[in-house]
Image (cartoon, grey):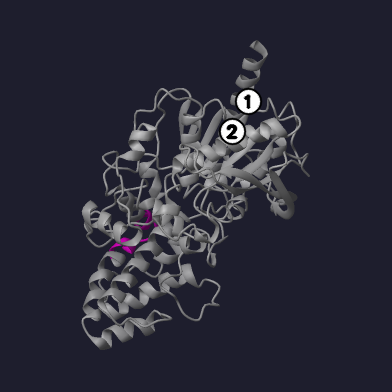
Amino acid sequence: MRVWWSLWGFLGVGVAVVCEAALGSYPRLRSASRPDPASASFSRSYRTCYFDQKIDHFGFAEDGKFKQRFLIADQHWRPGDGAILFYTGNEGDITWFANNTGLMWNVAEELGALLIFAEHRYYGESLPFGNKSFDDARYLNYLTSEQALADFAVLVRHLKKTVPGAQDTPAIAIGGSYGGMLAAWFRMKYPHVVVGALAASAPIWQFADLVPCSTFYNIVTQDFRKSGNCCADSIRNSWAAIDRLASTAEGTRWMSCTFRLCSPLKTAQDVANFKGWLSETWVNLAMVDYPYQANFLQPLPAWPIQVVCKFLQRPKLPDKALLKNVFQAVNVYYNYSGNTSCFSLSQTATQSLGMQGWYYQACTEMVMPMCADGVNDMFEPQQWDFQSYSDDCYKAWGVRPRPSWIPTSYGGRNISSHSNILFSNGGLDPWSGGGVTRNITNSLVAVVIPEGAHHLDLRSNSPYDPNSVLQARLLEVHFMKLWMKKDEEYRRRK
């Protein structure tokens, strides 16, 4: 089974950096009390910059460079008294993550922070070999988390040397999902570069032998069970209903029309792709089950799974009646605005991020085993078959995955020797099963947000946020201040 879930004014720098301006707005976090919706936004600006980054940090034969993009904002920076909040960019265009990481903008003034959003190599505009970057494995060989972390370390050190007043400014890594994994690993691998890390929804243990492969789908199923009576049962029964209808040409045509597919289902592979599209829809809904309306592919209602489950309360309906209800549920995710005329099976939230690079990473070091049994979860039974997975990767990229490399490189569960990492996880987030949800030491701290979906705490403050996420954000800022204070005390003793 292949699984590709993805994880969702300036003072000047040196001559290797080029910058341009951009504008936008974000809500602001003031306290644990609910903010006034009438004053929920303020202006912000950032500059888009480019840094000459080495293609290969660990060898010497390839001496080429590429332009790494990063965004920088200094409206609230207090040189000598503030911090560098450094977003460890993940699998997509960095502007998308800057626009969805409201926490950093919220706390910039309070922390006197210089904000940096660094783009991950091979995503957005940061292409080591330009348009040829994805042509073959020879060019893709430098797409690894280790190379990306080295990019971040070199960039932070460069900024501290070239930005006036930044030399002694403590840097804190912040990231969500894969970016959260990178934030944690950044602190582990380069503790002299960042004084601490906020790793939100970071499944650093979602790897071979660290968590059961069934964990992810079980949490998705729990979300649907809690959100509506018989909701998960309806989804579980839908797979057999699809198979029965797909056994005839008339049934396949009916499904194509009922689900308003842009391209009709014709082959068995089309039907398999259709079921995969539905599976990803349920997973994505679990990840974005936020307490307020949010915009992704389409606007989504508050608590979207509860809305979806209103259509999925009768699991024992005849096949066509059941699937009509499934369509109504899917329509909430893909067409809540009512403006979509047909659905494409390639239309998913991860598709919009430009996931080609992640597909490659999933076929090399980011191997996250997942399985379903169709009994304890609402998905079709799917075994974790590493050999089949590896064969698919070889066909696609000409490479074989190394499932044990990430635990080997970053320590697996044996990370107690590290320090100053805050792991936050939402109780609704399927990725929390591979995350750190219990304190390991006094400085490796877990924050669990029971009503939180995927890195809800990194999003902007909202009047509809549960109190648990407001408290989590205050705790995160508390630890950032603590790390800043300890860094200042250390520098004074030197």
Give the residue furthest to the bottom: 250
The secondary structure making up most of the magenta span is helix
Q: Check residue 414 for magenta coloring.
A: no
Q: Which of 308 and 429 is in front in this view?
A: 429
Res 159 quadrant in image: top right
Residue neighbourhood size for the residue with mark 1, other residues' Cα within 10 Å, grouped as few (<14), some (14–19), many (≥20): many
Asked if disc 1 and disc 2 are in contact, CB closer than 8 Å, the reply is: yes
Q: Which residue is drawn at the image coordinates 36% and 72% (left, top)?
A: 326
Q: Which mark is residue 424?
A: none
N-terminal-most mark, 1 or 2: 2
Residue 364 image offset from top left, x and y in percent: 35, 49
Determine if residue 228 is in view.
Answer: yes
Specify start and end residues of the magenta stretch as a single range.
223-233
Res 73 quadrant in image: top right
- At label 1, which amino acid type do we have? Met
Secondary structure, mark 1, is helix
Q: Check residue 226 for magenta coloring.
A: yes
Determine if residue 7 is in view.
Answer: no
Q: Which residue is drawn at the image coordinates 49% and 57% (left, top)?
A: 133
Q: Nearer the viewer, residue 423 or 265?
A: 265
Position of 75 with respect to 320 (left or right) is: right
Q: Which residue is tagged 2?
A: 172
Q: Which residue is tagged 1?
A: 484
- The quadrant the C terminus occupies is top right
- At label 2, which amino acid type do we have? Ile
- The quadrant the N terminus occupies is bottom left
